Amino acid sequence: MGDLGNLLDGFAHVATPTNLLMAFLGVLIGTAVGVLPGIGPAMTVALLLPVTYGMGPVQAFIMFAGIYYGGMYGGSTTSILLNTPGESSSVVTAIEGNKMAKAGRAAQALATAAIGSFVAGTIATVLLVVVTPLVVRFAVSLGAPDYFAIMLLAFVAVSAVLGSSRLRGLVSLLVGLVIALIGIDGVSGQQRLTFGVPQLADGLDVVVVAVGIFAVGEALWVAAHLRRKTGEVIPVGRAWMGREDWRRSWRPWLRGTALGFPFGAVPAGGAEIPTFLSYATEKKLAKHHDEFGNGAIEGVAGPEAANNASAAGTLVPMLAIGLPTTAVSAVMLAAFESHGIQPGPLLFDRQPELVWTLIASLFVGNLMLLALNLPLAPLWAKLLRVPRPYLYAGILFFASMGAYAVNSQPFDLFILLVLGLLGFGMRRFGFPVLPLIVGVILGPRAELQGRRALQLSGGDLSGLLGGPVSYTVYGLIVLLLAWPLIRLVLRKANS
Amino acid sequence: MDTDTMVTEKTAPTERPGTDRAQYGVCAFLAGLGLLVIVDATGIPNTVSSTDLLGPRPVPLLIGALLLGISVVYGIDVARGGRGEPEHGEDIDLASPIDWRTVLLLIGVFAANAVLIERLGWVISGGLLFWGAAFALGSRRYVLTAAVSAALSLGTFYAFAIGLGVNLPAGVLQGIL
């Protein structure tokens, strides 16, 4: 049980005053921005990344882990009290949660979300500890063609499966791949798409791209359609729940966890699908059928647990293979890189202290989140009343600060503006932003692995096909792409 | 949510008649981007070596070709009435038309910060950025906004530039701060 020893070491590293403070700050900031409309966890990590350049990577990641879990939880408060979910993964929570709040049961809805998130987060982090080393052991045996195939799978999954339109997802992915081309090609040293501008030779910094697309793009898009009258915030006291609520919540929590973790851990997962599945399951299993649609606590408990469990699951491919499947994990991957750390199977060998401290801080952050959120619910509700001009002006302010701090050049601010306008256009025309970010981050690596595979095969294109692992992955890709067709055939056969 | 997009895209026009013609602009943008990538790629000397049998050129050529291809598919989709659903959010009211005045003001304020940041320093230009952006977004409590701007820009400068060693320029206030 070397992993258990490593994990205990990790706890020892977290338990210093500075690191506990970082975890606390992360959870606090994460929940606050999760509650605030317009700011998601991905944007927060991107905005705060330049600030952490002065810290050590361990401290930075303890804070990011707190932001990650805090942001996931904070979204549920907005859904329950305001009925306007910010992240797609909290859409389901709003259905029953807001009904509960309107019926005067806001405290119970917030409590089942908070405790459910804690239960799911803790179980899912234990699963993460068990599963990740297994994935690492498998991943070290992979060669360049296998990595190339897995990255193609990630491209197909984020663009064709997770969004509502395959076409728009693919467009977004291609634009991301073009952004990734900018700069000097690492293998040959040739400049691509730099147009002789020296500042472009190093390529666009992923932080600048993420901040531009998430923060500036979002602020401009909201500004274009700003709601002049903000929604009604339902007042709430301390979050708590009674014996009957506990009795009705614990099974949905466990079922939600069981649905959320696997979906988060596979490259085609994400947090939306398991929350919907969990809602459907609870509705089917509930004894109080008539309560669904009028504020059933099971409809909050299950999806919230699924949401948090999938957040933990997402970290498995991110840490073990270096494969991001959600916007937050994509930005976290960029954060690792800007601290000079390369996630993937070798990370566990080279920097076990960092990895296990990060995992230990997930447990600590989860506990802090519970301790913080039950008594602080009224405070979070107040946060929903921040004047919107200040909120979005603040986003632009911190975006400019962060992007300038990356390279200390005003040129980046113009790039940021251009990317912000791109993000604005994507929101206007309904293009998902996740494929673009994944394209920017994985594009150069997919190209590198592909070229390496061709070098090994002596330039023969069959080198890209590789062995059994990549055959399986290509099979999956074909299945994903052909899925609508297969479903059509199945439906015809049934009727 | 669903992979069943073919159905939703076909039923879209019955809900709201008329195609979203601005999407043809997106189509042209994609085609233009594809061409640009291809033209740029043909200008790269394709240096092939024993460690790099592919060279730097084929990948951009492939991506450019895919962009050209997808711009055609996208154009067909738009012509058949396909439309992307604008993004929702807590503070977004999609029933209102795009408020170009606010957007252009924000772009102007943002660009002004980019031009001024090194000359005036972060404290002044960042403060102007916050004040201007809040004004553009409809804040009319000028003095309160100015106080918030000053607090934010001074606070971030001391906390991040001096406290954490983040690179923010002092500009004209060099030596005073």
Image (cartoon, rainbow, N blue to C red):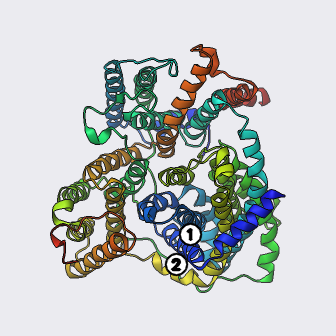
Residue A478 appears in the rendering: yes
Q: Would you call the spot at circle 2 few (<14 residues within 10 Å), some (14-19), or many (20 or more)?
A: many
Q: Kindly identify which chain the residue marked by label 2 belongs to.
A: A
Pinpoint residue B61: horizontal percent, then vertical percent: 41, 21
- Residue at 33% x, 73% y is B162
Answer above or below: position of A225 versus A427.
Answer: below
- Residue at 60% x, 68% y is A73
Q: Kindly identify which chain the residue marked by label 1 belongs to.
A: A
Pinpoint residue A407: horizontal percent, then vertical percent: 33, 53
| In this picture, residue A472 sits left or right of residue B53 | right
Towards the viewer: A432 or A179: A179
Residue A273 appears in the rendering: no
- What amino acid type is highlighted by mark number 2? Trp
Residue A380 disc label: 2
- Give the residue at mark 1: A74
- What amino acid type is highlighted by mark number 1? Gly
Answer above or below: position of B4 versus A352.
Answer: above
